[in-house]
Image (cartoon, rainbow, N blue to C red):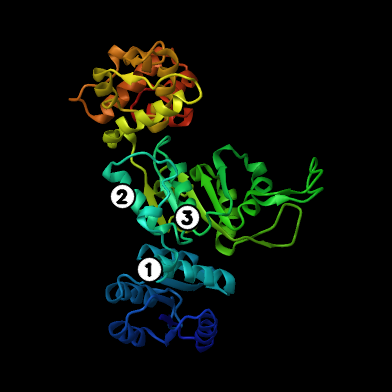
Amino acid sequence: MILIIDDDATVRMSLKLLLQRMGHATEEASNPDEALVKARKNRYDLILMDMNFSLSTTGEEGLELLMKMRIFQPETPVILITAWGSIELAVEGMRAGAYDFITKPWDNRTLMQRVETAMSLNGENRKKDGLSASAFDRVGIVGSDPALLDILSTVERIAPTDASVLILGENGTGKEMIAQAIHSNSHRKDGPFVMVNLGGIAQSLFESEMFGHVKGAFTGAVAARKGRFEMADKGTIFLDEIGELDMSCQVKLLRVLQQHTFEPLGDSRSRKVDIRVVSATNADIPSMVADRTFREDLFYRLNLITLRMPPLRERSSDIPLLLRHFLVNAVKGTGKNIPEIDGDTMDWLTRLPYPGNIRQLKNMVERAVLVGGDILYKKDFFTPGISPENAPVSTSSTLEARERASIKEALEASGGNLSRASRALGITRQALYRRIEKYGLNN
């Protein structure tokens, strides 16, 4: 049952007919008081509500009603209905607990996708679309740490929906694999999974890369080309490094996420696209929103569901499992036996800070297999010039102190060469810059 709350009878009738054609039962309320009476008596699967119920356009009535609905219907998703000029009001409503918002006039297809996604996430279609624990595809994700298992449990619950997901975490923590798991366990799993590294796309090429272009759109466009969004149609698009996107490109991206339409460069005709959006970043997006370097409305479009990947140093119990996994993969096709790891070395490896996280551990294992023998020791895991004996592994030191010492060692061993130091640590230059600034190592 869906509750429609709007003081405009025409809007209520339009929504009622649209929802009933899709097989949903509906009830209506024309004002907050009537809506609260119904909310106290009945249980709803979804609530669609306007933000204004008087001549005032401040939205205060809508926000107050939303807060009360969260009390009487705490598990029910609420989709707000607002005019295009009131996006800021809708964003404020999402902060107060709304699930999503649509703008007037709405596109019927987009609205129904939002409705179905909200109801699926709420459990209405769980039985139909869900996956049993035995059918869950981990896509090669290794680990049994409680923090990781909690994330995988969330992935299993949200994968059957089309909810947008924002994955946060340091470089090398496995954000791409989580995105792949979301896709592989969804109803889109037979569709394309298109990964885009937004940090590697120049601003001038953004439209062509993302939306494609027609022949002759610009000098050198000798043939038409599909963009990433069109390539991802009926599947999932993974927007990695979303925090690197400049403001002008953010505006262009927002429109596609809101309306699921775009125009290839040089073409005035809009094209529809059916996609699920998963994005990831190692940046502090809330701080960027506060600094006005990242659009707030885009942020709320992206993070309907937010997953935070723990750094490897916070899931050290998984290090032995990961070591074994990487050792097996490293010897495949080489004819070598899987080497063993010296006991002291294993203990030492579980206590390293790993600023480059899982990616750094993988690089260390691959190097050790190449230079080591049947038994691997400390010296086999370190890049030349970085002394294992001086590596920060004291259990009495804090994780941050150990990470700082590890970065300092790498910088000294590389003679201050940031490219060499970042490779040795298994992190990007950008991530190394941030840590140098964080720990005051640039003085």
SS at mark 3 in the image: helix
**Contact (CB < 8 A) between labels 3 and 1?**
no
Give residue 328's mark: none
SS at mark 2 in the image: helix
Compare marks 3 and 1 and give the one earlier in the sequence. 1
Is residue 78 at all visible to an observer of this figure?
yes
* Image quadrant containing the N terminus: bottom left
* Amino acid bearing label 3: Leu
Compare marks 1 and 2 and give the one earlier in the sequence. 1
SS at mark 1 in the image: loop
Give the spatial CA distance, label 2 vs label 3: 21 Å
Which marked residue is nearer to the observer: mark 3 or mark 1?
1
Count of numbered labels shown in the rendering: 3
Residue tagged 2? 150
Residue tagged 1? 123
**Label 1 Cα neighbours within 10 Å, binned few <14 / some 14-19 / many ≥20:** some
* Image quadrant containing the C terminus: top left
Q: Residue furthest left?
A: 396
Give the spatial CA distance, label 1 vs label 2: 19 Å
Picture residue at 40% right of the left edge, 68% below the top: 127
Residue tagged 3? 302
